[in-house]
Amino acid sequence: MRQQERPFTLTGINAALVGFCLLLLINALYLNPACYAGGIYFPATLLIAFIVASCRSVWLTQTGFKIFCAVIGLIAVWALVQWLTGWGFLGRKSARALALFPSTNILATVLNLGLMPVLSYYLLGRGGRGVYGLTLLLFAGLLTTQSRGGYLGLLSGVLFLVTFVGKAEVVTQWRRYRRVAVGFLAVLVFFKFYAWLGLANWSTDAVFATLMYGDTSNRWEIYQVAWKGLAEHLWVGIGYYNFGYYFEAHKVPPFLDRRIIFVHNDYLEFALETGLLGLGLFLLLIVAVYGQLFKFRQQAMAGQRLPLILSAGAITSMLAHALVDYPFYIPVLMAVFGAYLGIINQQLIDMGATHWQLQKMSTQYFLGLRSGFIGNALVIGLLAWLGLPAFALVAANYSSYRLLTGDVQQALLWSGVARTLQPRTAGYYWKEGVIWRDQGVAQNRPDLVEKSNVIFSKGLEVNPFEVNNLLEKTALHRKYRTLLKQPASHQDIMTWINHAKSLQPHSDGVQMEYVRSLDFVGEHAKAIEQAKLLVHRWPQSKSAQRLLESVSHE
């Protein structure tokens, strides 16, 4: 047997990253009472991007970075045209550019991840008019987002660059700094003039208001709710990606009629959802990165380690933006961050940073199989496991399609496939339960109604924070109790609906079912009172008005 050792390099950075990602996976798979596919995908995306960048850092720093800049440049053009014309193209119309992203803040982060490396490259004395023009284009794209978090990210990246390269380097390249300042000012003047003509909506009022008066976006109210939750779940948190559920139960004005799923501060959200342990590991990763960066600062400048400096500027902008938004909950942003982190890690290793060679992997035979074959099989198995949530979603969507075409049996079949592939996703139980209920009611078959009741109950077990299964089960025992073998008592129905109210006290669906349940158990006066409150809260809602009429018995 021939053996060829393949060393794995362990550093403080990748050790901290692996620890953080493993904590997120353990939290999502074992500690979290509610399952969310992103709990698997997000850490996996970060870790896989890091590994790929570490193994292919040369290609990424040459060809890969050029491709990335071209893509970011096209996105910036898209955003600029969108802002200049007001057209939505593939997205909805908005005064702030969105390009192909659902949020302006995501677009701002993406642009900064391209702008900071290009800007740093130019300020380090590299590139000519083409790089300068690309810098101004990306800056213009950033302005179209009107994102204060994006501005904060750019400012933080520039401050890091100036600090890292040192005063001497800044003085040497002062003409380029001046040229960039003049170019940025010219872009700002154009935006201001274009808005003054009334051709587009753009303003810096929100920026100055924030500087003068502090928070003007009601983020502080969200932070206070998060702080309260952190005090109650200090060490292991409420579960990765569970802030949306927590906020539904603890909503405060002015968000009573809005669904908020992010804290808009990733550090605080990591602390709330994964506890101080999770936040500590993430901060340990940041300390490991910047500790090594400044330890090898002089060596990096002397050797003109451009990939290292450019990548560091990019991740700094994203880490700063994370103070006021949620970039670490967006897969594409985590992938780019992981790639930059992998480049930094490899560059530091090349400069002699402390690392250990772990001689673990070899090409020897095991159980008659080559290690290469075993490794490939493990990779395929891992990809298949990571693909389970996607396969389940495809099955669920196909089930919806078959249901629309009237093929109920195929709809139930594929809904069952989705539920089997992802047995901890409550939404799949709700969907299948609704189909069984409708079929049982339409055909007057108690066995099908009983089956829907069982499925709704299982959905409650897999996710205790989700109210849809609870609402459907409550309505089932209220409306179709004659088709059930053991219909719930009035007390049980009120217990269920009160529990739903504790989970989502401001949900219109929960409030309406609460009114119907009150009327069903005989508390007509209270039902009418609550219905009037709903009509007062939503005066334009026809559903609320019909509900009031139905419980008033007029």
Image (cartoon, rainbow, N blue to C red):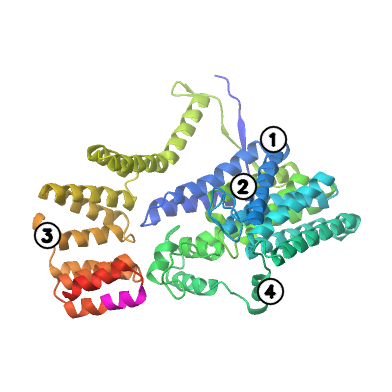
Disc 1 to disc 2: CB gap under 8 Å: no
State yes or no: discs 2 and 3 in contact (Cβ < 8 Å).
Answer: no
Residue 142 screen position, x and y as percent: 68, 57
Looking at the rendering, the stretch of residues picked out in magenta corresponds to: 531-539
Count every numbered label the image shows and give the total: 4
Q: Earlier in the sequence, mark 2 or mark 4?
A: 4
Inspect this view and state whether residue 238 appears: no
Q: Residue at x 78, y 52 (%)?
A: 120
Q: Nearer the viewer, mark 2 or mark 4?
A: 4
Q: Amino acid at mark 2?
A: Val
Observer able to see residue 496? yes
Q: SS at mark 2?
A: helix
Q: Given the image, on which type of amino acid does mark 1 rest? A: Trp
Residue lying at the far top of the rendered structure: 1
Circle 3 sits on which residue? 481
- Name the quarter where the N terminus is drawn: top right
Q: Amino acid at mark 3?
A: Arg
Q: Which residue position is annotated with label 2?
A: 336
Residue that label 4 marks: 208
Distance Cα–Cα, label 4 vs label 1:
43 Å
Name the element at disc 3: helix
Q: Residues within 10 Å of mark 2 (few under 14, many from 20)?
A: many
Q: Earlier in the sequence, mark 1 or mark 2?
A: 1
Question: Horizontal and vertical percent for residue 449?
Answer: 15, 51
User: Is 326 in front, or is 475?
Assistant: 475
Q: Is residue 39 left or right of residue 447?
A: right
Q: Which of the marked residues, 3 or 4, is nearer the chain's N terminus?
A: 4
> From mark 2 to mark 4, how far is it between C-alphas?
31 Å
- Where residue 504 sits, quadrant-wise, is bottom left
In the figure, is residue 437 to the left or right of 153? left
